[in-house]
Image (tube, rainbow, N blue to C red):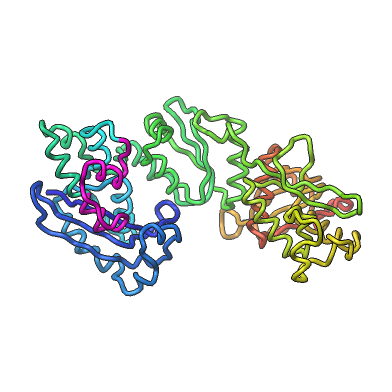
Amino acid sequence: MYAILDIETTGGKYNEEGITEIAIYKFDGHKIVDQYISLINPERPIQPFVVNLTGINNKMLHNAPKFYEVAKRIVEITTDCIIVAHNASFDYRILRTEFERLGFQYERKSLCTVELSKILIPDQQSYSLGKLVRGLGIPLSDRHRANGDAQATVKLFKLLLSKDIEKKIITETVRSDTKKQIDNKLLKLLEKVPSVTGVYYIHNENGVIIYIGKSKNIKKRIRQHFTNENKKSKKIQEEVTDVNYEITGSELLALLKENEEIKRIKPKYNRALKRVKFDQALYQFTDDQGYINLKVAKVDGRKSSVTTFTNRQQAKSFMHRWVDEYSLCQKLMNLDKGKNNCFNYTIKKCLGACILEESPEEYNARVQQLIHNYSLGKQDMIIIDRGRDIDEQAVILIENGKFMGIGYFTLNHQINNLDILRSIITPMHHNRDAQHIIQSYLRQNKKLKTIVLSSSENKIN
């Protein structure tokens, strides 16, 4: 007996999606013997691109049943059935995740019609459901709606059954868990890893570290390594014999420690070694009228930058935000290429630096404030973030604009001396990646506590 199903979701981050619609057809190999179709209230917003794709919007789901209200029916209709879906790894993962949220372990054997089609109907131009069934002459209505896609999958599965003459492929393709069968070895390793923020190290049988990563939830991230089917994950699954971790508490410290460790140890499966974390930078220059101009350009290692960005889109987003925050001129920020005044001057948001109405001294003071706030420059400072325990805080030390290292102190021990601070810091290397990590994190976490150090008295102000 088969439960042929299709699920539509809200979209969003991995394992945070919610189900918006489900269609299940119970199929005995010849005919449909039962069915269940329903919209579901996911209790979370639907991503806009998903609304455009499916036509399902938040308003439509307002009065729909929540998953816990339909869970019993789903269990009943799929009992003693093999789950069949087009890209079963997705649908089955989503279904298992929803049941896990209810504290229920949902397990079924499964078949993927994508994999079966590649074996039984080779040389197709595409194995996406829409293109595949059209190419096979199978009617498909209501594409990207659960019922329409599930009906098409039923007809596709009938065709596949007829083509499986020796009945061997289906037998061999059934798997206990489309979440890629976490075997006993991987399950035992997963059990020892906590759901905390930190850095993790994956070792092979010789104890060599083959991969380093960081996560706000180490257990969740390791599970992804052990269930993903991409080439790197499969190799890690084959080679892993142990997983160790270091709790950091702070995501910033995890990012910095991951960066440091990858550069030092150079694990063979870390792609981060082969690419930089950013490719755009913010540069400053003073024009002939004495105004400080800011401009985003591709990173040039020969030049000193104010800050760096992951990509140009991110850079432009912050530039527009800073224009409003600091009342800056769009022309002097290189966001307006017009010959006369900038657009913001027209709507009285720019004070007139673009047409020399505002003095360079007044305008530059605000630009300098921006640079001070978002550039490490030559500053001596510490950044304080959450620690590993409730009575602890993490600290990042910056001296003369250079990242020096990370450490921890307890809340009842006030750090007010730079020499003491240096003694608790684990030294780390300053490099462009570390600088980018710190600047990017500070931009995105504006409430993070930063303290300027007084170099003259060797104390913290």
Q: How many marks?
A: 0
For image coordinates 32% across by 43% down, the residue present is 128
Q: Is residue 108 visible?
A: no
What's the magenta region? 125-152
**Residue 40, located in which quarter of the rendered image?**
bottom left
Out of 410 and 277, give the one closest to the viewer. Answer: 277
Q: Residue at x 80, y 50 (%)?
A: 380
Find out whether residue 144 is within the magenta segment.
yes
Question: In percent of the image, x 56 and y 52: which residue is there?
Answer: 249
User: Residue extending furthest top?
Assistant: 206
What residue sits 21% from the left and 36% below the top?
Answer: 173
328 magenta-colored: no
Q: Position of residue 184 (x, y in %)?
A: 30, 38
On-image quarter of the C terminus: bottom right
x, y percentage for residue 419? 79, 47
**Res. 403 image quadrant:** top right
**In the drawing, does residue 429 fall left or right of residue 284?**
left
Point out residue 196 in the picture as x, y percentages from the top left corner.
49, 51
- Whether residue 378 sits left or right of residue 216 in the image: it is right
Viewer-proximal residue among 426 and 72:
72
- In the picture, measured across the screen, residue 456 lies left or right of residue 331, that is right
Q: Is residue 252 visible?
A: yes
The one of 116 and 99 positioned closer to us in this rendering: 116
Place residue 436 in its image quadrant. top right
Name, please, the residue furthest toward the bottom. Answer: 63
Q: Which residue is at the front of the view, 15 or 327?
A: 327
Question: Up-down: is 144 above or below 426?
Answer: below
Q: Residue 440: image x %, image y %?
A: 65, 50
